[in-house]
Amino acid sequence: MKCPNCHAPIFENDRFCGECGTDVSAVTMQPADTAEKQVHTNTVGQSQPKKSSNAGSFFTTVLTFLKNSFLKPGSMIGSGKIYAPQVTSATVGMAALIVSLLFFIMSRSFAGPYTEIPISFLISVFFTLAVIIAIFFGITMLMNVLLLKTKISWQQILHDFSVSTTVVLGLYTIAILFSAITLVEIGVLFWVIGSLLFITAPIYIFLRYAGNNKVKFDSYYSLVIYFLINAIVYYIIVRIAVAQSLSELESLFMM
């Protein structure tokens, strides 16, 4: 059987296409001969696909991934059925953009009477968020490459990391919205919870993999290695953040 959207091979009882993330349950749950006819019909009917239809299908898949990430993250992490990298990356990118935009709007609203925050601040926030996400994805990759004897594909790691990151960005969005309506304490609570989940996501994913694969080190020392890597990364991030903040403050007072 083949996916009616991207024509990649799919198998019986598959719910989603492993390449594009399209829901293929309508095809895979049918008897084999009926499914083949259905795929053939779809292939002929889509010999000249429209870009708008493909874009709509992709966006629907992104929304499905977003919904499943919030409803059943534990089931999705470590699952053999994964969404395509472009779907997971687009979801995380969209969520990061929303968080950056809301943070920019809130910052501009609060700082309005005192100073003007330029649009470049939005770009800086998004870029900083993207870099931090990329760094922690790199840590997740490094943990699994160094400590697992059985190789895990980067697509699987990206999928699982994107699930946890989507949940974290959702918590950040809630935190900003609560802060915007002056419920700052609740906003801070959600922000702290999101940050703790973000920090522990790489080791959680690693431990999920370690349950099915032999590890090169004792699990206790795996935790030590993880926190050592985190300490180095946080030291670098804090040094950069402090230097950038001092530069921004200096430029504001010079105006």
Image (cartoon, rainbow, N blue to C red):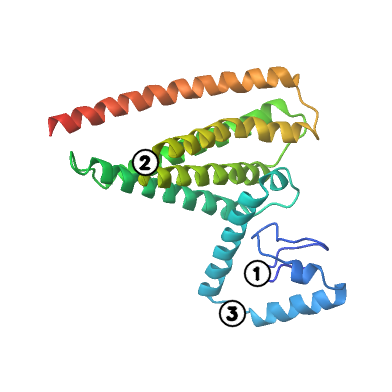
User: What residue is disc 2 on?
Assistant: 125
Dot 3 crowding, Cα within 10 Å, few <14, some 14–19, many 20+: few
- The one of 108 and 33 positioned closer to us in this rendering: 108
Residue 249: percent from the left, percent from the top?
23, 29
Residue 79: percent from the left, percent from the top?
74, 47
108 lies left or right of 237? left
- The one of 158 and 251 positioned closer to us in this rendering: 251
The first of marks 1 and 2 along the sequence is: 1
Where does the C terminus fall, quadrant-wise? top left
Kindly check if marks 1 and 2 are in contact, taking CB atoms under 8 A apart as contact.
Answer: no
Vertical arrangement, residue 48 with respect to residue 144, above or below: below
What whole-number distance in Å separates the C-alpha atoms at marks 1 and 3? Answer: 12 Å
Corner quadrant of residue 24: bottom right
Helix, strand or loop status at disc 2: helix
Helix, strand or loop status at disc 3: loop
| Furthest-left residue in this view | 255
Front disc: 1 or 3? 1
Corner quadrant of residue 34: bottom right
| Residue under the image location 83 percent in, 73 percent down | 30
